[in-house]
Image (cartoon, rainbow, N blue to C red):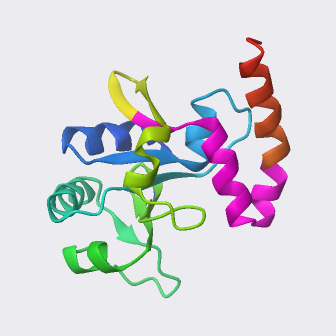
Amino acid sequence: MATELRFDAALAVLVEHEVEFIIVGGIAAILQGSPLTTLDLDILFRTSDENHRRLLSALGRLDATYLDLAGRRIEPDLEKLASMKIHLLETRYGRLDLLRTVGDGLSFEALLDHSIVLEVDECRVRVLELAKIIETKEQADRPKDRYQIPFLRQLLAEIDQGR
């Protein structure tokens, strides 16, 4: 699927469908001032039957399909949303990674109090606080996370000092 990177448009669809989610990862850091780039939108979603239904409806509007090396067109469904931990999707607006947990198994409910509400193109969205982004990246301990952490720590220090 040829896509245009428009994370703002993807967020608008999720908000319109009243999906409960927190933006995590690179876009969450960018929204708080990070100079690093990313090629996907990572969201942590509430795992409830009602939220799964709203999310599935939004994914339909986004023309979401799973990334598949064999080129098959595999669409999300309620069973997959309720059972799979990670959903790597391609949408009309770019890559969307849906996560049930981040870091050391931290869920939407566990991180709700560590999120802030920001406005992105007239949409109010929950975004994981920068300190928690750093913590979850330390827990994940992937090479790309180890690279990003010093930049994010510096940004957090600048924010704490009022720039």
The one of 158 and 41 positioned closer to us in this rendering = 158
The percent coordinates of residue 92 (x first, y second) are: 37, 53
Residue visible at 26% across and 39% down in the picture:
15
The one of 85 and 97 positioned closer to us in this rendering = 85
**Res 4 visible:** no
Q: Give the image quarter of residue 51.
A: bottom left
Q: Is residue 55 left or right of residue 40?
A: left
| 80, above or below 138, in the image | below
Residue visible at 39% across and 54% down in the picture:
108
**Quarter of the image where the C terminus is located:** top right
The percent coordinates of residue 77 (x first, y second) are: 22, 74
**Quarter of the image where the N terminus is located:** bottom left
The stretch in magenta equals: 126-148
Q: Give the image quarter of residue 123.
A: top left
> Is residue 149 covered in magenta?
no
Residue visible at 59% across and 66% down in the picture:
104
